[in-house]
Amino acid sequence: MDQSAFPLYNHISHTRPERFITLSDLANMASSPTVGPKEKAAALTPYRAQGKTKQAAQDAEYHALVTDHDNDKKSAETVRQLYENYGLPALIFSTSSHTPDEPRWKVIIPFSRPMTFEQFTELANGAALLLGTDKAQSRVQQVFYVPNKLQPDSAYEYYDDTQGRTLDPLNEAHPFVSACRDKNLDYIEAQQRQAEQAKHTTRTVSQSEGQIIDRACQQFDIANELRRHGYKQIQHNLFLSPNSSSGKPGVVILLNEKDGKQRVYSHHGETDPLSNLNNAGHALDVFDVMCLLDYQGDTAMAVKAMATMVDPKGQQQRQRDHTAEKQRHQNLEAFNPPVFNAPAEADTETEHGFRFRPIGTMLQNIQPPAWLIKDIIPRDCLAVLWGVPGHGKSFIAMDLAASIATGIDWHGHRTKPGAVFYIAGEGLNGLTKRFKAWEIARQVDLSSAPLSVSSAPAAMDQPEHVLIVKQAIADMAEQLQQRPVLIVVDTLARNFSGDENSTKDMNMFVRCMDGLRHEWKASILIVHHTGKDTSRGARGSSALKAAIDTEYSATMDELKVIIMECHKMKDDQKPPPLVFKLQGVKLPLVDEDLNDIWSCTPQRMEDDYQPPQKGSLGRGKNQTKARQILAELYREHEQRLMDDGRDIDTAVVTIDDWWQRCEQSGIKRTRFNEVKKSLEEQGDIEIINPYVRLAA
């Protein structure tokens, strides 16, 4: 076989030179796969190109067809027989997520001559329909990974059934090529029939639904929605479909002078979903675009989702309250498998996926602990980090997130890199400044890191809202070409619509988090507050504490030192406490008065740090209480400075403010003067009238 027949482009040029490999090279790799996470293996494409852009992929020549058998649970013999029946040369190998119980296969079919992108797309779409494989491999810039397995002893199989053969992808007499062509034509004809039927079908909506649609058209912008879904803006009203192979913009936005609404019309072919709907005989308003691209054309689902965005109060709110319980149970089906209610033969998997396995088999496949951050946060876990407001828990959460996204060690603990999604409850500007401070302090560039921050909080105890969040994460993960490994919810209170003390509401939150987590086997970190009694840990229903795998607290002592302590590590040993101090970082910004802008980032301290014991900061109860009150006043002032982007080291407290707060706590004026003098003599405070400072 000609060794130049199968050139593949290596997409990890940041770690090694760009190069081309042949099918023979891949066969050798299949016989000796790499070991480690899939993301660290070489990522390849079945085309030769001069760059990594979408346009370069559309202009490239394609030299192989790649198919995925991920969800059909076919055995190796069944997969081999499937391709053999069509007389196809096939290099078959299991993927890194392959197990004997959940078989997953990658198949490479080499071509004897190249195809254009348009020809390749038709063949790949038809092959996916014919073979029941994933259609994702026909997308522009879609990559696949060279043979790899997670651990040296992980289950792995490969079969080289090419025998020096290749497929002529343009030979329509070949049974596989002709069958793929027929399947693709059948699919296009079915789409056209649906469009024709829609042309003669009047879309009817109720009066209340019509109000939601009208509000959506007023509040959302077509151009923004097109850009969000990958349409490239060529001119102010001309866009290029992400699926276009011609490179010519065929999507145009027009203004209807009668009703003042913008509408869009697509002149692209069948590959553009907007064209399919335009075939129904009408231009599309922004609701049509969102309904089609976000909700697969399901008008009822789109109206329900948009009602929460365009009509948070009023008639639709009352209607949602009336039907909330019913809708909640319906949406939960997206997260939970059906209830097992059918008997099955021993050791045989039922239609619901329930089965028993011998303990001997399980012991043979026992795996070591898998860590997102070594010894700190496991992979695929539900974790909570709680603390009093202003005690640094969000700083630690952001530090964890940025370290994972960039793949650097977290204060001496190895991380598993991957995409991180930060669901922020408030303060996006402050969040940006904190991440900039982290970037400066760590000297690590975040500009290209797979770290994404939400534009707003979300009701993470409402299944319908979590479905929207899940889709947003999936869209961004596909754009980044990285699997989500961590989702941060900061804070629970800002992303929770129910009653934190209600077991029912908290159980719903946990089930929603599990549904989000299991989608990618990602870890979820929930930043949470304590109640009035800090000794009882995180506030709210104990249902959360019972459900989580990992629990940490962040507590700041009188010396402004943050102690991060583990209270629960479900399946592994708890790590010792970690100690941090917030390091001030000057940002490359000034305010309108030309003052420097500052923020902070956690700095690890020595592990032998001993926090001050209760009563040790003075020689009596009043001295200790007054010292603690002064420390709290400083923390409050520092937080205000931090929120304004100012240097926290400029924080000061007046003696009068200190006295008033002490009086409120029960320290009389005569006793206060004695306490102040005692603390000054001991060197715990410094008096610089009219201010009082804490000693270092």
Image (tube, rainbow, N blue to C red):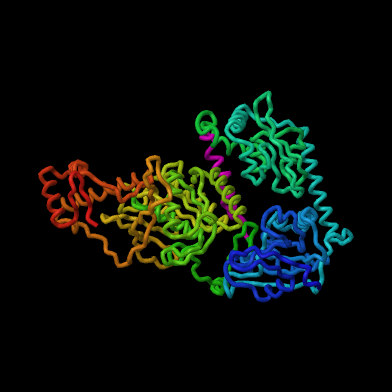
In the image as oriented, which residue stretches furthest toward the right? Answer: 173
Q: Nearer the viewer, residue 324 or 40?
A: 40
Q: Eyeballing the image, is 177 above or below 333? A: below
Residue 347 seen anywhere in this rendered image of the structure: no
Q: Nearer the viewer, residue 518 or 348?
A: 518
Image side of residue 93 versus residue 464, left or right: right
> Where is residue 438 shown, x and y percent of the image?
43, 56
Q: Is residue 464 magenta?
A: no
Residue drawn at x 21%, y 46% as measured from the top left: 691
Q: Eyeballing the image, is 61 above or below 634? A: below
> Where is residue 200 shown, x and y percent of the image?
78, 32
Residue 186 seen anywhere in this rendered image of the structure: yes
Figure quadrant of residue 498 = top left
Total number of numbered labels? 0
> Where is residue 363 shown, x and y percent of the image?
54, 73
In the image as oriented, which residue stretches furthest toward the top? Answer: 258
Q: Is residue 325 magenta?
A: yes
The range drawn in magenta is 320-343
> Where is residue 678 shown, x and y percent of the image?
12, 53
Residue drawn at x 51%, y 31% as measured from the top left: 318
Q: Quadrant of the N terminus?
A: bottom right
Residue drawn at x 70%, y 72% as measured from the top left: 158
Q: Nearer the viewer, residue 289 or 693?
A: 693
Q: Quadrant of the C terminus?
A: bottom left
In the image as oriented, which residue stretches furthest toward the front? Answer: 594
